[in-house]
Every structure is written in structure tokens, then in C-alpha cells.
Amino acid sequence: MSTRTVMRFTGVGGQGVLLAGTIFASAKINQGGFGMKTATYTSQVRGGATVVDIQLDDKEIWYPYAIDGQIDFMLSVADVSYQQFKVGVREGGTIVVDPNLVYPTDEDRKKWNIVEIPIITIAKEEVKLVLTQSVVALAIANTYTHAIDDQLLVDTMLAAVPERFHAPNKLAYELGQKYAEAAMYEAEHA
Amino acid sequence: MAAGGDNVVIKDGKREVVMPGNHLAALAAVDSGCKFFGGYPITPSTEVMEYISDILPEVGGTCIQMEDEIAGVAVATGASMSGVRSMTATSGPGISLKAENLGLAQMAEVPLVVVNVMRGGPSTGLPTRVAQGDIAQAKNPSHGDYKSIALCAGTLAECYTETVRAFNLADRFMQPVFVLLDATLGLMHAKAVLPTVEDVQAGIVPRKKFEGEPENYRPYGVEQDEAAVLNPMFQGYRYHFTGLHHDAMGFPTEEIETCRKLIDRLFNKVDAHRDEIELNEEFMLDDADILLIGYGSASLAIKEAVLRLREEGIKVGMFRPITVWPSPEERLNELGKQFKNVLSIELNQGQYLEEIQRCMGRRDIEKLTKTNGRPFSPADISAKVKEVF
């Protein structure tokens, strides 16, 4: 049986979605497994659709891109990339979107489990550091996929961040977790 | 401290690192004793320069961002002329600009490692997208006759090991050696298992040096299957560098026999020692009925496709040249006799297919090509195999 978790993070160039992918892959490798992150972007420096494919497995991964139709979880913070890359998510898979920036159709909501979490607003207004959006996204993705032990993921993330930014990034992770758990609870009790 | 920083774990005598392919090429250069990098940033190779600018000064080396691609290769060639291991990195459009100086390095026999992280072309093409469109260019980037050596990494670990090999081959054969990566390999980020720095350093054979009296030194006066012996500069051994046809001391000449022998030797120094250069991977070929041929990042999709097709009972295998130039002539010829069904898979319009046809001596080879900047998926390959065989 395949043990592979396949995730896709999408946004626009400059938003920092690439970082979350690197942290996931590194954490899986630290755990003794195989992690692969592959980024694809356009030639626009800022504003072009960016997609990061993340594959985590206990077995070796050769092909570095997620295969359309096999993605379990996608997170998107820009409509341009959401519209372009949503087709890769398997039917019934979860797509977390920032509702201020991404506009899923009614059909999308039937096909996928669309979850709305204001990722950028959380980073900007609650952490007060917009750069931490990728860590908010990291926590949300892990809460939904249970791909990596939370403590290992946080440790891997902190190792990639300068020490003076540890506190806001820890807060960003906790908030991401809290919002994701609240969204899951709400969905179950709706 | 070994370059590469905190990402390195030593396990069973090997290093495990978590890095993108572009960083691995830079790390390999530093571990191989490279002391100079000259270049100009270009997508998707920029991270090679970015990373080496961090780690090369730590070991006493120099990294210079020049004003353009041409100046980048010119300073890298100059550094190598002085006797140190030297590298430049770029993408296809950069090779087009560097071509004139690469011809000079071929003619003057200056070792140089040239990393080309391939992207869509021609011209500026698709800057951030993947292609294998520079395979033909790597054989003959500049005008004139010479014999290229080009190594094509197909895994993250090979972004490292092929760069190491390129440095050793450049010094052995005294000429530029290409390391071909592409946008997929350069930017993909995962674990790579590498040899230790000690093992890499133990494999370094220094450039040949003439130790006799300076008046007896003839840098280009070597046997017809040998490379020039260029001593480091400023050590009392005088000679001349030129792009013109030259004599044993490097001075220009039009003497008929000298000119013939020079170009013959540029070919023969490589051809006579192909066994030292050739490297291939054969994947599940032993019991295969269908032969897939591919290289570089395309082979990652091919391997997945081989496994899937075998699950369906279709016995396929893959042959992957790692040294693409000179091509594995004899092995391809043998495989051409052994397999009736052959499919060549390339992210270009068939640049290597012609070489495969030549080596196999047949033209009935199926092809799967793509030039829209997107990678092959394993499904593309499985579908093609089912369609044509």
C-alpha cells in the first residue's frame, strides 16, 4: 500500500509559499523517510502563479512532481494559481483557501472539501508579521494531513529561521493549528 | 568544516544532505578543490552562483559576478589558465553567449567546468521551465572541430557526483567539460546521498605538470592521444595561449602538418580514452522486451513508468547515458541489435535521437518528445509505450 502523502501549495511569486514545502520535505527526511519538494513558477518575479509540490513517503521518490488526480491536500493563497492548479486535487480531497484572495465556485465546493481560513490576515493581524504566513500554512497543512509529528515539524521550521524570529513563528504555527482545528470542528458539527 | 553547513549527516561512510540540485553542483565544485567561479546569474541556474558565493570564500576561493555572461566565462577561463580549478554556471542562452570563449578553451586546452541548467529555448525561450534543448549545443557550442565532453545528471546525487567527475575529466583531458542539469533537477529539493569530502578529494588527480628544465618544455608537443601539459603560470615555464592554430610552444602557425595534427589530436585525446569517460545506467533491462532511452530529469518519469508498466505485465527497461558526449556508441549498437522495440524519450524535438539512430545503425526508433516547458509525466510515457508497441 502506498504510504505517500501528496500536497500542493499555491500562491503568487513573492508570497513565500516555497518555504513551507522545504520544511515539510526536510522534516520527513529528519524522520528517516523521503521528502521531495519541487517548485514551479513563471518568469514574472512578482505576481506569477507559483506551485510547490510536496511528496512525503517511507519509500524512495523518483518523479519529483505531484501527479494530477493524486493530490490529497492543497492550500492556496491566490486565485490565479488556485484556478490553474486545483484540477490536480483528487475528488474529495481538501483544499484550504484564504477566502479574501481565493474564490472557489459552487461546483468546486461539491467536488472538494473546501475550507476557508484567512491565512494572510492571521499572519498580518494576529502574529503581526506577514512573513509568517508560510508557517501558518504549514501548521494548517499538517493538521489536515497528519503528515509529520508536530514537534518535529516545528523543530525543523525553527532550525530554518533566525533565532530572533522564533517567537512569532511559534505563534504562527499555534494559530494555524488552532484555526485548522476550529474549521474541522465546525465542519463536523455543521 | 565541510562546506554544506548544517544540512549534512554522515551515515555509513556517506553524507546525507538535503539540498536542491543547483546547490549540490556548487558544493561539488568546492569539495573538488575549485578555487574560482566567474559567472552571471540566469534562471534557472542562479542558485549555483548564489550558493557558491557563500561557500567558496570559506575555503579561500573567489567568486565574481561579472558584467555579463561573456565576461563570466572569460574570467573563469583566465583563472584556469593560471592553474586553479575553475567553474562557471549558466543556462542555454548563457552558453550561446559564452560559445566564443568555450571555443578558445577547447583550442588552447584550458580545463573548465561549465554547468548548464537547461531551460526552454531557443533564444530566451521559457526561462523558468524545463527542457533538454541544449544537448546538441553541448556537442558543438562553438565553431570549428573539437570533441566535447558533456555529462548529464539524472538524479539529485548526480548533480554532485557528475560535477566532481567533470572537474577530474577537465584536468585529465585539458578542455571544458559540460555538466548538464535542467530546471527540474536544479530546483528540486530532497535528500541526496553523497560520497564524503575525503573520498572526493582522494579521487582528485592533479593536472599533469612538466617537471624538467624550462628550456625543454613543449606544452603542446605531446603524443597524438594526449592532452596538452600546461604548467601553472608564473613558475618559470613560458608558453603562449592563442585561439589560432599553434605549435608546440603555443605560438601561431600555419604549417600544414602541425595544423592537421593539432585538430586530429583534439579529437583523438578524447576518442582514444572513451572508456575513461563513458558512464551509463541500465534500469531493469535484463528481462525487458521494450527499451526506453532517456537521460537527465526525463529519466525520473521513465523509471516510474517502467515500474507501472511492469505492474501491468509489460516488460520495459531503461538505458540512460550519463555521459552524453561522447555518446556510448558501442553499447547503443549492442542494444540496437538486442531490442526490436526502442523508444527514445527527450524534452526536445529529438536532438539525441539522431545520435541513437547513428549508433544503432537503424532508423525505426520511436520517439516521444515535448517542447512546451512542461516535464513528462509517467502517464505520458506509459501511454506512448502502449500506443506504439
Image (tube, grey):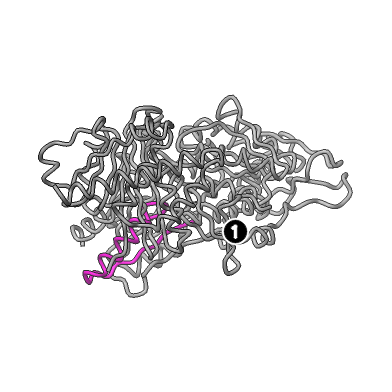
Badge 1 crowding class, 10 Å Cα cut-off, few under 14, some 14 to 19, many 20 or more, is: few
Q: Position of residue B89 (x, y in %)?
A: 55, 39
Q: Which residues are magenta?
A: B294-322
Horizontal side of B253 relative to B369 (left or right) equals right
The image quarter containing residue B58 is top right
The image quarter containing residue B230 is top right
Point 60% across, 31% down: residue: B72
Above or below, A120 against B134 in this view is above
Point 62% across, 46% down: residue: B175
Q: Quadrant of the C terminus of chain B?
A: bottom left
Q: Is residue B310 magenta?
A: yes
* Chain of the residue displaying label 1: B
The image quarter containing residue A115 is top left
Q: Position of residue B153 (x, y in %)?
A: 48, 53
Report the front residue among A111 and B272.
A111
Q: Which residue is the site of mark 1? A: B272
Report the front residue among B248 and B276.
B276
Above or below, A53 against B12 in this view is above
Q: How many marks?
A: 1
Horizontal side of A166 relative to A172 (left or right) equals right
Q: Position of residue A190 (x, y in %)?
A: 13, 47
Horizontal side of B84 relative to B55 (left or right) equals right
Amino acid type, residue under disc 1 in the picture: Ala
Above or below, B184 against A126 in this view is below
Q: Is residue B315 magenta?
A: yes
Report the front residue among A133 and B288.
A133
Circle 1 SS class: loop
Horizontal side of B169 relative to A134 (left or right) equals right
